[in-house]
Amino acid sequence: MKTAIIAGCRTPFVRSGTHFSRLTAIDLGRHAVTELMARSEIPPGEVDQIVYGTVVHDPQAPNIAREVGLATLPKDVPAVTVSRACASANQAISDGVNLIESGQADVVVAGGAECLSRIPILVSDRLSRTLVAASRAKTLGARLRTFARTRPRDLVPVAPAIAEYSTGESMGEAAERMAKENGIGREEQDRWALGSHLKAHAGTEDGRLTAEIAPLYVPPKYTTTVEKDNGIRPDTSMEALSGLRPVFDRKFGSVTAGNSSPLTDGASAVLLASPERAKDLGMEPLGYVRAYALTALDPAAQLLQGPAYAAPLALDRAGLTMADIDLLEMHEAFSAQVLSNLQAWDSDRFCREELGRARKLGHPDPDRINVMGGSIAIGHPFGATGGRLTTTLLNELHRRDGQFGLVTVCAAGGMGFAMVLERG
């Protein structure tokens, strides 16, 4: 049984610190799911489960799925939050597929949200211990003596880590290292980034991208309406991109803010159903999940190379080859990461030594990859991107009369995700 994907939508993806800075990931998730239910026209009571992803969890509401579900679905719909770094929404969709194909659900809402404008700020370990000790003090004097040991450096706030816990290396540093090790030059990276912006602008102007977006009236005054992604730069050029300084290796580096995805706020939602239930409800599927795969590699190696390992496994499970793929949607964390993975698939040596294959896997022509731009231009709300990739791919398969599409995502921890989709 292949799980049907009925509909998908998302909020606009906006740069953190801009339009959605006063909202939360829960607010954004509620908006995406509300719009999903309206577009699908399915009664909310038909939903059996909601699975929702996020990366930077709100300590006051750690189960974002339940908070989103309580505002959009009947109160008796179970909800679970999943987190697999940048592939969190992909994980939510995969878990929905598992629920349906194991007979535990017929209709599932999946997706994810992230609001990097509103990240939790922690206190230092020393201040944390002081606060705990003070709370246990039995007298005012004892409490004051506890606080008297506090030093100014203890009061410095601690932001969530952006580096790998196991290696201390950030994703940007890993991308820089991959660019050097794989011989991915600055011009090649900037040209990929330029294409991302130009294609995303074209998809916005002709309405293909905006058709997937649920416009959002920004509280509290609701006088500002956000209808499209605000990170797309149609005015950029190779000259402008080449003028940016490297970020992670200022002297010899090639990874810049221009060829990297920006910190972004946004949410996505996808409606899944068993083919039988979809037919009973009179719903026409956008497409079907043919297969998916998850892989992991040593984070100290090629951290963002996970898709190179996940895609061939997903294709094998789908009974297909890369030659069967009409469109590829690859998450663009960095141009260097995209180009490194494409290089690996096109290498006989890599595919023989790393994948145990007789010859290279290959990949679609570049004009069939990220045909409406990618995360470099559109943005990357960690927990939400997987829903965008899935929805965009299926919609574009219909427009181009294609049959099969492939979604890939790299994720922190050296993980990779791939899913093969079939047009409905």
Image (cartoon, helix red, strand yellow):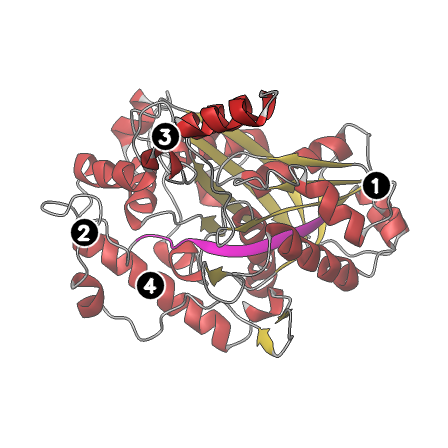
Secondary structure at numbered mark 1: loop
Secondary structure at numbered mark 2: loop
Which label sits on residue 124?
none
| Marks 3 and 4, how far apart at CA | 29 Å
Residue at mark 3: 164
First-in-chain label (4 vs 2): 4
First-in-chain label (4 vs 1): 1
On the image, the x and y values in percent for residue 184 come to 20, 44
Tell me the quadrant of the picture where the N terminus can be found. Answer: top right
| Marks 4 and 2, how far apart at CA | 19 Å
Label 3 close to label 1 by CB (< 8 Å) = no
Q: Is residue 19 magenta?
A: no
Would residue 295 be visible to someone looking at this image?
no
Q: Amino acid at mark 2?
A: Pro
| Marks 1 and 2, how far apart at CA | 48 Å
Q: Residues within 10 Å of mark 4 (few under 14, many from 20)?
A: many
Residue at mark 2: 246
Label 1 close to label 2 by CB (< 8 Å) = no
| Marks 2 and 3, how far apart at CA | 20 Å
| Residue for point 84% across, 56% down | 42
| Residue for point 44% across, 48% down | 331
Residue at mark 1: 77
First-in-chain label (3 vs 4): 3
Magenta stretch bounds: 260-271
| Residue for point 51% across, 45% down | 407
Q: Amino acid at mark 3?
A: Glu
Residue at mark 4: 195
Task: Identify the image quadrant of residue 105.
Answer: top right
Which of the pair 99/260 is nearer the observer?
Answer: 260
Q: Amino acid at mark 1?
A: Val
